[in-house]
Amino acid sequence: MGKIIDLKGYKDKALANRVDRLALLSVFYFKDEYGEEVKDLEEEVKYALVIMTYKFLSAAHKDGTVIINKKGFSIEAEVKEELKLCIESAIKVQSVTMN
C-alpha cells in the first residue's frame, strides 16, 4: 500500500514552503500583470512565460529585491521593469516566430 497522505492541514503545510509561496506568487503575479497581453498566445507559451517569471522572481528573491512574507510581497521598481521588458520581448519573439 502507498504512503497515506495527511489531508488535514495539508494546505497550511504546503504553503509554508518558500518555494511553494514563490511559485504561487509567480503565477498570480504573471496573470495580474500580463494576463491581457498574453490571452491570445498558445497555452504552452503562457506556461513558458510563467516559468520564466518564476525563475526571474526566484533570482530576485535570492538577491533581496523581492521580499515575501506572510502579508504578501514587495518587488523593487527596477526589478519589476526588467521583468516587464523580458516578458514583452518574449511575446514579440513568439509573435514573429509563430506567424
Image: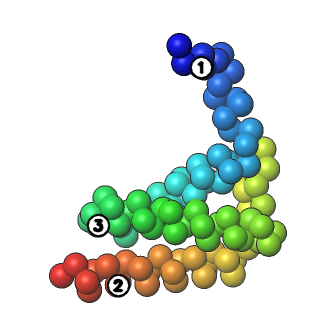
Is disc 1 surrounded by few (<14), some (14 to 19) or many (20+) residues within 10 Å? few
User: In the drawing, does residue 10 fall left or right of residue 62?
Assistant: left
Give the mark nearer the N terminus: 3 vs 2: 3
Is disc 3 surrounded by few (<14), some (14 to 19) or many (20+) residues within 10 Å? few
Is disc 2 surrounded by few (<14), some (14 to 19) or many (20+) residues within 10 Å? few
The residue at 80%/72% (across/down) is 63
Distance Cα–Cα, label 1 vs label 3: 39 Å
The residue at 31%/58% (across/down) is 43
- The reply to whether residue 87 is visible in this rendering is yes
As rendered, which of 9 and 4 lies closer to the eye?
Answer: 4
Q: Amino acid at mark 2?
A: Val
Given the current orientation, which residue lies at the most extreme left position? 99
Mark 1, residue position: 3
- Closest to the camera, between mark 1 and mark 3, is 1
Locate residue 25, reporting x and y percent.
Answer: 61, 53
**Quarter of image, res 60:** bottom right
The residue at 67%/77% (across/down) is 79
Locate residue 9, reporting x and y percent.
Answer: 68, 21
- Closest to the camera, between mark 1 and mark 2, is 1
Distance Cα–Cα, label 3 vs label 2: 12 Å
Mark 3, residue position: 41
Dot 3 and dot 2 residues touching (CB under 8 Å): no
Locate residue 41, reporting x and y percent.
Answer: 29, 66
Q: Amino acid at mark 1?
A: Lys
Mark 2, residue position: 93
Give the mark nearer the N terminus: 1 vs 2: 1
Vertical arrangement, residue 71 with respect to residue 75, above or below:
above
The residue at 76%/55% (across/down) is 68
